Image: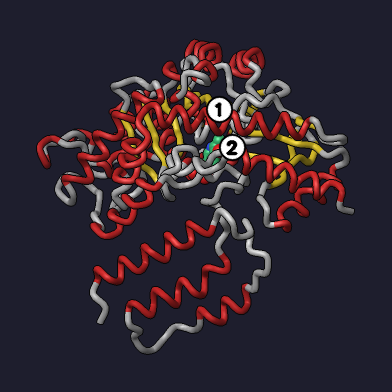
């Protein structure tokens, strides 16, 4: 029998070995044999296996299929990386295994979320009185925020949606940036509103909402239960909506304003990019991720709501009058603000990330990623036949290589090179390489090396 101490140490050391390799190994596994891996994973075993053997088997079998998403040259999607203190805190979280339901199941987990939620609001420039929940990611944050919105706009129309559901109730309008993230649509499906309810608003050439069109769309029908979804950080270009103007127009129509800022909201944490988020504090709810730009391990997202009672009424499954109740010295119950009941104690890793970085470190992380994105843009726009297609205002760079099929070929060649990894997207009718810089480990040398890989792919036919 292996001692638990030895076992956890061993597991942690295998994880650290992997992490160390991610700077040099091919970013995407070069010879992936999923069938062999499936065979090795085997059939449901009849008999037990000693724990240490289990850990080694798992690591041996799956490591060849891991992607170096925590490495410095992974630029796909917006995956972030993971800070050392946050990774280690997540190991502690696993060891402690606290059910972070409320202050009775884990006073420590409830308190840490309480403290850390306050830190996040300060850092992101959100109202100090806003309620918050530590959720699994941006999808969950959007869902919770829109549930609170659904509650509030229907309550204002005299309809108790938690009790009566949507059938027979007043209709709800949802008006959103035409380039919203697809998770908004899924949240609307889950909330029973249906993705078809969405009324898209035109965007400018960077994907930011056209505020005149927002006014026009809203004016098409008389005021009633309405939710407006804005975006901080267009998923392709990184563009920001004009929050002050859009919120003012939406509020004139009595609408609830939600801002999806899965990665873009972090612009508020740096003096250099804060102007992009001007006016966010006038919204009614906000969604962002920890596991993207804050570099906290998966699963980590945050939802904030300017209307604490709407948030709790929509999510709590005790009773509205019990929110903020006296259990555990008056500590809020984390589970009243999220989708899950029994849940991982997500506050620890976020506390550790913010403690490791401090305000200055978060600002520096944001600034460095933005500077590296500009470095990509500057170097790539010097190359013949290569065009940067967006205004690089944040950490996103969209690159065209002439014809769509040539762009897809270049992206595919770069991905196969193992030097770096970036995805492709379709934006404004064209295929483009999508580069996202969101990992604390990425350096100027990593950008230069990745540009060289792109240039090499370009000349390879
Ligand atoms: C990533 C993203 C989401 C979804 O977040 P998850 O953490 O993947 O659930 C929502 N909105 C935007 C703008 C995103 O970039």
Residue 191 visible at all:
no
Q: Position of residue 19 (x, y in %)?
A: 48, 57
Per the model, the C-alpha gap separating discs 1 and 2 is 8 Å
Q: Residue at x 30, y 66 (%)?
A: 8
Closer-to-camera residue (382/240) = 382
What colour scheme governs how the chains and residues are painted in the rendered image of this protein? secondary structure
Tally of numbered tags:
2
The residue wearing badge 2 is 181
Closer-to-camera residue (264/320) = 264
Q: Position of residue 437 (x, y in %)?
A: 59, 38
Decide if residue 279 is on the left or right side of residue 384.
Answer: left
Q: Position of residue 377 (x, y in %)?
A: 71, 31
Vertical order, 260 against 452 (above or below): above
Decide if residue 45 is on the left or right side of residue 419.
Answer: left
Closer-to-camera residue (6/62) = 6
Whether tag 1 and tag 2 are in contact, CB under 8 A, the answer is yes
Q: Residue at x 47, y 18 (%)?
A: 271
The N terminus sits in image quarter: bottom left
Residue located farthest toward the front when viewing the structure as drawn: 445
Q: Position of residue 55 (x, y in %)?
A: 39, 73
Vertical order, 400 against 278 (above or below): below
Closer-to-camera residue (183/394) = 394
Q: Is mark 1 within 8 Å of ligand 1?
A: yes
Residue 395 numbered mark, or none: none
For label 1, count other residues whose C-alpha is less than 10 Å away and answer few (under 14), some (14-19) or many (20+).
many
Is label 1 in a helix, a strand or a loop? strand
Residue 231 numbered mark, or none: 1
Residue 117 visible at all:
yes
Q: Is mark 2 within 8 Å of ligand 1?
A: yes
């Amino acid at each position: 029998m292996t001692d638990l101490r030895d076992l956890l140490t061993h597991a942690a050391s295998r994880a650290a070995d992997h992490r160390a390799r991610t700077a040099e190994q091919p970013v995407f596994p070069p010879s992936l044999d999923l069938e062999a891996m499936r065979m090795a994973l085997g059939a449901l075993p009849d008999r037990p296996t000693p724990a240490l053997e289990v850990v080694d088997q798992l690591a041996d079998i799956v490591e060849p299929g891991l992607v170096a998403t925590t490495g410095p040259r992974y630029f796909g999607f917006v995956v972030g990386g993971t800070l050392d203190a946050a990774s280690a805190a997540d190991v502690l979280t696993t060891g402690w295994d606290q059910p972070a339901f409320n202050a009775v199941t884990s006073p420590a987990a409830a308190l840490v979320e309480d403290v850390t939620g306050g830190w996040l609001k300060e850092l992101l420039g959100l109202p100090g009185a806003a309620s918050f929940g530590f959720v699994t990611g941006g999808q969950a944050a959007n869902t919770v925020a829109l549930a609170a919105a659904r509650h509030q706009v229907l309550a204002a129309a005299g309809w108790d949606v938690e009790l009566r559901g949507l059938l027979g109730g007043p209709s709800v309008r949802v008006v959103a940036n035409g380039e919203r993230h697809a998770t908004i649509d899924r949240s609307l499906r889950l909330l029973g509103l249906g993705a078809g309810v969405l009324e898209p608003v035109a965007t400018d050439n960077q994907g930011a909402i056209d505020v005149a069109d927002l006014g026009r769309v809203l004016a098409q029908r008389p005021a009633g239960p309405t939710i407006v979804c804005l975006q901080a950080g267009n998923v392709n270009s990184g563009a920001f909506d004009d929050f002050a103007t859009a919120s003012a127009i939406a509020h004139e129509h009595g609408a609830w304003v939600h801002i999806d800022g899965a990665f873009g909201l972090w612009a508020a944490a740096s003096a250099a990019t804060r102007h992009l988020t001007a006016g966010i504090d006038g919204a009614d709810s906000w969604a962002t991720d920890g596991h993207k730009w804050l570099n906290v391990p998966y699963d980590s997202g945050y939802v904030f709501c300017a209307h604490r009672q709407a948030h709790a009424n929509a999510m709590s499954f005790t009773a509205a009058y019990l929110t903020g109740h006296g259990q555990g010295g008056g500590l809020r119950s984390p589970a009243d603000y999220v989708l899950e009941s029994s849940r991982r104690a997500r506050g620890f890793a976020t506390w550790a990330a913010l403690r490791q970085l401090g305000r200055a470190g978060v600002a520096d992380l944001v600034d460095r990623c933005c500077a590296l994105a500009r470095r990509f843009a500057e170097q790539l726009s010097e190359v013949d036949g290569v065009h940067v297609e967006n205004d690089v205002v944040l950490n996103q760079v969209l690159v065209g290589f002439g014809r769509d099929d040539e762009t897809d070929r270049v992206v595919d060649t770069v991905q196969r090179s193992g030097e770096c990894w970036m995805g492709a997207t379709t934006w404004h009718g064209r295929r483009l390489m999508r580069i996202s810089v969101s990992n604390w480990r990425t350096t100027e040398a990593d950008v230069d090396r990745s540009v060289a890989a792109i240039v090499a792919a370009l000349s390879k036919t």
